[in-house]
Amino acid sequence: MKSLNQYSLVIMGVLLSLGIAAGGYFVGQLLYNAKENTAEAKGLAERRVEADRANWNISYGRKGYQFSELKNLYQAVEYDKNKIIKVLLDNGFTNDEIKVGVIDYEQKEYRNEDQILIDTQHTLSGKITVETYKVQLVPDVRTKLNALLAEGISVMNYDPSYTFTKLNEIKPAMLKEATENARIAANEFAKVAKAKVTGIKQARQGSFYIKDVGEDYSDDKKIEKDVRVVTTIMFTLEN
């Protein structure tokens, strides 16, 4: 143990400042406990994945200024709805993936400073929701849907929500990789200190984090995402 104690402080400085780059990508952080003869290392694993589910909201509507216009407004809104659905169906989505909401009616009154009614607005609006696993279709169909604006259809094409639902499928492999990378860090430390890693005393799994590629906070705005996990392993050492 004399040799291990002699080198521990020097090696700690090197590991914490530079990290270890061997056999994979991991967190170069290692804490040595000379009293217990253990070394605690962190191992990182990352995966680049693609979202496998998309939720996309589309709204549309018509406005009029006379109550007598409601019948025509309703017919116009039904026409708009059918045009939107046709674009969706013609480009690969199915009826099971398309959910049509009810038509909402709203009346607004506009009054002057003397509270005299000067105008009334009647609005009919609807919403269509697309929930699909055909994630790659969504960006292209959104562009085609916007072409309806040129036909006088007031379509609101909201940003889709992209989610990754297969985390459980990649968890085991990622945890294995993170643990192996932590062991690499511990082995490098032990090798320079003329010791060897003999086993694992304690292991802590960190949380899995999913973030949109290139983003610091969002996790549902992009199809491509990064999945990350860090494990903390306490290894036993022997001189």
Image: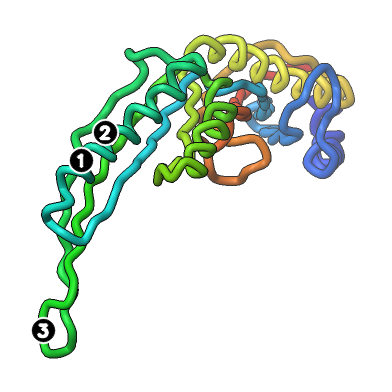
* Foreground pick, 211 / 58: 58
Where residue 222 sits in the image (x, y, percent)? Answer: 58, 34
Q: Between residues 168 and 157, which one lies in front from this camera angle?
A: 157
Q: Quadrant of the C terminus?
A: top right
Give the residue number, with chain letter if any, for mark 2.
78
Q: Would residue 167 be visible to someone looking at this image?
A: no
Which residue is the extreme one toward the bottom? Answer: 114
Q: Amino acid at mark 3?
A: Gln
Point out residue 231 in the picture as x, y percentages from the top left corner.
Answer: 59, 25
Image location (x, y in percent) of residue 152: 43, 45
SS category of the residue bearing label 1: helix
Q: Is residue 234 above or below residue 211?
A: above
Indicate the secondary structure of the residue bearing disc 2.
helix
Question: How far separated are the C-alphas under marks 3 and 2?
Answer: 35 Å
Residue drawn at 65 percent across, 20 percent down: 178
Whether residue 70 can be seen here = yes
Residue found 10% across the figure and 83% down from its top = 116
Q: Residues within 10 Å of mark 1 (few under 14, many from 20)?
A: some
The residue tagged 3 is 115
In-image side of 115 versus 13 (left or right): left
For the N terminus, the quadrant is: top right
- The residue singled out by tag 1 in the image is 74
Disc 2: CA contacts within 10 A as few (<14), some (14-19) or many (>=20): some
The reply to whether discs 1 and 2 touch (Cβ–Cβ < 8 Å) is yes
Q: Hey, what amino acid is under mark 2?
A: Glu
Marks 1/2: CA–CA distance: 6 Å
* SS type, badge 3: loop
Q: Mark 1 or 3, which is nearer the eye?
A: 1
Q: Which residue is at 77% across, 25% downward? A: 25
Q: Quadrant of residue 24?
A: top right
